[in-house]
């Protein structure tokens, strides 16, 4: 049996007039949350973050047959992170886009780390982090830190 659509006997009335709202008509703008890290960012970490983007790709110096591509990125060691947390800035190395993808496992089984276990990758990263931290702190002036 076919039914006709239901009809109201009295039409609905708008109690308040509808008006278009724009993003800028809010009383207060939404604030971006600070990135979640394992600790507070110190002055040394901020300086390290600036310094690391001026360094060459670590794959160029430590990996045979690595071909760099893309801009230099900060490759974090993903060890004690979870729940969208990031490691400290001091636990990272400079790397091009290709190296960053290989370290994080986005290279689809290709590249230098293709047969490595997660433990082997983390061990390699810790060694490279120690090298970069030693180079950074050899020239770092700790008197710049504000207490």
Image (cartoon, helix red, strand yellow):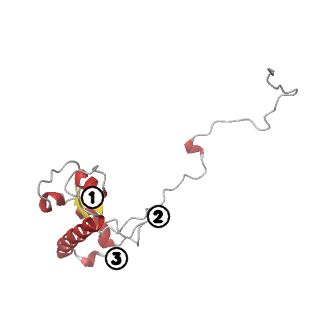
The residue at which mark 3 appears reads as 146
Can I make out residue 56 in this image? no
The foreground one among 124 and 12 is 124
Of circles 1 and 3, which is in front? 1
Q: Is residue 11 above or below residue 45?
A: above
Q: Give the CA distance from mark 3 to mark 2.
A: 31 Å
Q: Give the CA distance from mark 1 to mark 3.
A: 34 Å
| Numbered circles on residues, count | 3
Q: Is residue 12 above or below residue 127?
A: above
Residue 130 position, x and y percent, is 21, 73
Q: Earlier in the sequence, mark 1 or mark 2?
A: 2
Residue 76 position, x and y percent, is 31, 63
The residue at which mark 2 appears reads as 83
Mark 2 crowd level (few <14, some 14–19, many ≥20, 10 Å Cα): few
Query: On the rendered image, what quadrant is the N terminus found in?
Result: top right
Query: Dot 2: what SS?
Result: loop
The residue at which mark 1 appears reads as 103
Give the residue drawn at x 59%, y 44%: 25
Q: Which mark is residue 2?
A: none
The foreground one among 28 and 39 is 39
Q: Which residue ends up furthest to the right in the rendered image?
A: 9
Mark 1 crowd level (few <14, some 14–19, many ≥20, 10 Å Cα): many
Residue 102 position, x and y percent, is 25, 55
Query: Dot 1: what SS?
Result: helix
Q: Give the CA distance from mark 1 to mark 2.
A: 20 Å
């Amino acid at each position: 049996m076919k039914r006709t659509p239901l009809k109201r006997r009295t039409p609905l009335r708008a109690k308040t007039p509808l008006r278009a709202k724009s993003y800028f008509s809010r009383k207060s703008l939404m604030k971006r949350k600070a990135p979640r890290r394992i600790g507070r960012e110190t002055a040394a970490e901020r300086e390290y973050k600036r310094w690391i983007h001026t360094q060459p790709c670590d794959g160029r110096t430590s990996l045979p047959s690595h071909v760099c591509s893309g801009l230099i990125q900060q490759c974090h060691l993903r060890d004690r992170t979870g729940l969208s947390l990031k490691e400290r800035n001091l636990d990272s190395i400079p790397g091009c886009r290709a190296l960053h993808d290989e370290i994080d496992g986005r290279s689809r089984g290709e590249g230098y780390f293709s047969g490595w276990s997660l433990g082997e990758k983390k061990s390699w990263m810790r060694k490279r982090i120690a090298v970069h931290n030693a180079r950074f702190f050899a020239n770092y002036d700790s008197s710049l830190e504000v207490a």
